[in-house]
Image (cartoon, rainbow, N blue to C red):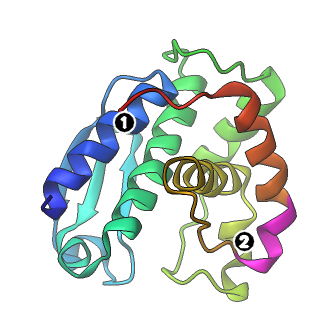
Amino acid sequence: MDKYALINYGIKLGSKVLGISEPSVVFVGNDVFGSSKINAMFLPEESSIVFNEYWVEEALDIEILITCFHELRHTFQYKSISNQHIGDEQIDSNKISLWKKEFDSYKQSRGDLVAEDEEYLLQDIEVDAIAFAHFMIKSLFDQRTYVPDILKSLVSDRVELFKLSYTLLEQ
């Protein structure tokens, strides 16, 4: 499977699991991101996931799927904030308020999952997206993803909640 077909597969599968409509997918160059280290981002206003095409060409298949699931979880979060989510997972109003606050004052990653990026990593929307990607990869391939040390317990707790909410659908 080529990398672009893999992205389509990841977007379709993740959207189905989350109970959301598929966002549009766009490919752009490094110049749009300002860094070759940023692989993708969710743009709420357009309901689209934008991939760095240079990163896609160099990425491993597993990294592409991790990124698809991570960005799809941001799509889910935004749809939950906007009352557009129709899936089974129930999100309480305090969580939705926190997600809205974090989307409104988003702390951008510098492109490195390192301790200096703590402000970015510790946002609940990022913990949630990292945990969802971890959950999906573990469920599909029985592989663990990299989780920064400062997030290990937060991600582990969130993964346990996902296990209660999601049963992976047949691919």
Asked whether 144 or 31 is in front, the reply is: 144
Which type of secondary structure does the marked residue at label 1 adopt?
helix
Q: Which label is found at residue 13?
A: 1
Magenta residues: mostly which secondary structure?
helix
- Amino acid identity at mark 1: Leu
Image quadrant occupied by the N terminus: bottom left
> Residue at image x 46%, y 37%?
75
Residue named by callout 2: 119
Q: Report the mark closest to the observer, 2 or 1.
A: 1
**Image mark count:** 2
Along the viewing direction, whichever of 48 and 167 lies nearer the viewer: 167
150 in magenta = yes
Above or below residue 81? Residue 72 is: below
Q: Residue at x 59, y 45 (%)?
A: 104
Comes first in the chain, label 2 or label 1: 1
Find out whether the residues at labels 2 and 1 contact each other: C-beta distance under 8 Å: no
Residue at 46% x, 26% y is: 169
The image shows residue 88 at horizontal and vertical percentages of 61, 15
